[in-house]
Image (tube, rainbow, N blue to C red):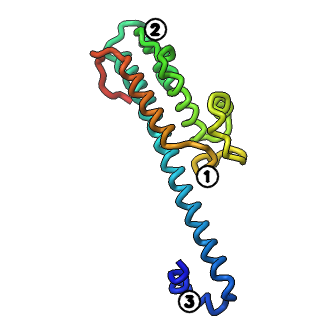
Amino acid sequence: MYEEYLNEHLEEVETHDITDIPINIQSMCYHRYFLIKNMKYRYLAIHISLIYQMFEQFILSLSKHQQKFISYDIEINNLELKNIHDGIKMLKKYNLDIKKMPEYQKINELRLLNNVIKHGDGDSKKKLERIRPDIFANSGIYVYNNTIIDDTLDISKNDLNIYIESIKKLLHHFPDKIVHEYYI
């Protein structure tokens, strides 16, 4: 590492005290470490958010398909399907109560985490702190609107895998023969 730094910054070596070189190299290493750490965090946060968005779009698409092509119920046909809560409400009319399924707790946690990643501080953060305080244990700073920029949340690949498995298990509760095409 010393030789690489010296070769790249030879002109600077003449102007620095020789004792500054290890400090400069150490500073470069810290910079690189935090850059890689932040990129890893952002990659994970984006994937967690993406998994939730895919699930929400599936629920809404399924609900809109049922509403448009299957339902003869006026109340269902008049529902305005804007978010996952509306989709869950509509599916409940078909005796598919997602909120009563054991996997819903993790999916709701995922929903809250997605909102915190996207928006930072707010109502979802307060709710998520109550059910998963460990996500905020290492932040040590205020969580405002920097949750996608800085690694302020203590999330892991294990969290992502748990959310994916919860979605898979929840989808196994759906009827075997459900008519569906994507309509978003």
- Image location of residue 131, percent across then percent down: 63, 28
182 w.r.t. 179: above or below: below
The amino acid marked with disc number 2 is: Glu
- Image location of residue 134, percent across then percent down: 64, 37
Q: Nearer the viewer, mark 3 or mark 2?
A: 3
Residue 79 in sight here: no
Q: Quadrant location of residue 123?
A: top right
Foreground residue among 53 and 35: 35
The amino acid marked with disc number 3 is: Leu
Q: Are marks 1 and 3 in contact (CB under 8 Å)?
A: no
- Give SS at disc 1: loop
Which disc number belongs to residue 75?
A: 2
150 w.r.t. 56: above or below: below
Disc nearer the start of the sequence (1/3): 3
The CA distance from mark 3 to mark 2 is 75 Å
| Disc 2 packing (10 Å; few <14; some 14–19; many ≥20) | few
169 w.r.t. 139: above or below: above
- Image location of residue 67, percent across then percent down: 38, 16
Left/right placement of residue 52 relative to residue 142 reads: left
Q: Nearer the viewer, mark 1 or mark 3?
A: 3
Residue that appears at 49% across and 39% down:
158
Task: Spot the residue most to the top.
Answer: 73
